[in-house]
Amino acid sequence: MPTFLPAHNLRRSCPQYAAIALLACTAYRSNAQTPQPAPPLSAVEQKMAATIDAHLAEDRQLLEQMVDINSGTMHLAGVEAVKDILLPKFEALGFQTHWVPMKAGTARAGDLVAEHLCPQGTGHCGKRLLLIGHMDTVFEPESPFQKFEIVPGTDDKVATGPGIADMKGGLVIMLSALRAMKDVGALDQAEIRVVLSGDEERFGAPVELARRDLIEAAKKSDVALEFEPSGRSNGQDTVSLGRRSSTTWHLETTGLSGHSSQIFGPRLGYGAIYEMARILDDFRRELPEDGLTFSPGLILGGATAQANADATGGSATGKANVVAAATMANGDIRTLNNDQTQRVEDKMRKIVAEHLPQTDAKIGFDEGYPAMAATDAGKALLREWSDISVALGLGPVSESGVMTRGAGDIAFAAPYTAGLVGVGMLGEGYHAEGEKGYLDSLSPQAKRNAVLMERLTAVPR
């Protein structure tokens, strides 16, 4: 049985062989009949772990400070206030930062971009990393859920607050891991880009502007880490390798109005509401396939139907004895990959086109989040992540299925990079009042990220 010097040790003593060693170790682990022990932590990695623990109290204070700032997506001043806290912290770590305002172009706050470029020139410092996060939450100023609080009876291990896990805890973990790298000199030879959006929870349009900074950074990167909340299943921590898409659809049906006694007849036909019911029921019967969900979230119908400006409600008029002339519905589709998105949209268009007598209908789709499909490169990253976790004494990490997550920004980077989804804080109840974050996950997640990044940035491209 062949033996290999762990790649993260070999790269330091014989950097010219590091890439070969990494590939050999990966292939060997995947083909072995029995699991191999995880490579142990180096002295540098042990020091990073100790640094993270030493700053834990400081990190918790930063988390509370950011959670207490309302940064709902549409509260632009609040998002910028979070940016004002984060920007100098990245600069203190040696990152060049700039703020990209987007109020005029997308009606959103903007992006915080931070770059730590390779001193020898781009591409000469090992794997180029992209760290992805967002500063906004779903809780706007009118929400009653506004403050960080320790959950009673949890031994100071669980806190609640708006966006605590999704994803202000992830931002703290990101900074903690980078600080640990800097303290041991690992940042000196690292090429890392950070893109923090101000509108992940409700991204603006046009998408080519709203996600321009992220896509451009992805094109210059080899690995992306998305610091969204992490998960736990059957007592084991998890990360994901993919994300489903999210596309919004808008359906309108029309019909001839008149006395209800004449419905179904040759003059009035079926009316707009029956046409809407036909289409939605055909969706229910004909569309289902693995990994797909589709849901109408809002319906208005009657003699008139009108949505409000942001499509969160509207008004309808009508009478029980009048055939409905107008109906509208908004919903979403979530798919495993972009081919599935296109296939489902085509099916929906075909169903919509098969009208009941004396009715009409049309459907449109907003450009939304693309899907991120799992890849072999992502699986290799997960194996490395799990090995690191074992070496840290935290136990193995398993994959969380794509159906456990919604859409996310890393999908825009996926065509250009391998990636891991959900390397941030553990928690529960995201997007709901009472959202919780597990404070005892801050240190373990920061350690996993720091060691992974230190190893990746030391492996030649």
Image (cartoon, grey):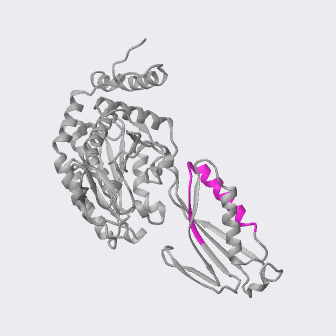
Q: Quadrant of residue 293?
A: bottom right
- Where residue 84 sits, quadrant-wise, is bottom left
Which residue is outermost to the top?
A: 1
Residue at point 31%, 62% (across, down) = 162
Place of residue 371 in the rendered image (x, y in percent of width and height, measured from the top left): 52, 50
Q: Position of residue 348 (x, y in %)?
A: 67, 61
Percent coordinates x, y for residue 228 in the rendering: 37, 50
Quarter the C terminus occupies: top left
Q: Quadrant of residue 258?
A: bottom right
Judged left or right of residue 281, residue 68 is left
Q: Nearer the viewer, residue 12 or 379?
A: 379
Quarter of the image that includes the N terminus: top left
176 w.r.t. 13: above or below? below
Please tell me which residue lies in front, 434 or 332.
434
**How far from the left and from the top, in percent, is residue 38?**
35, 25
Q: Is residue 131 above or below residue 321?
A: above
Q: 80 and 264: which one is in front?
A: 264
Q: Is residue 186 visible?
A: yes
Task: Name which residue lies at 30% across and 61% down.
Answer: 99
Q: Is residue 331 magenta?
A: yes
Extreme residue toward the front, this view: 153
- Answer yes or no: is residue 182 visible: no
Q: Is residue 214 magenta?
A: no
In this rendering, position of residue 255 left or right of residue 86: right
**Rendered view: 311 above or below 325:** above
Segment tinted magenta in the rendering: 329-354
Q: What residue occupies the far right of the structure in this picture?
A: 266
Q: Is residue 141 left or right of residue 354?
A: left
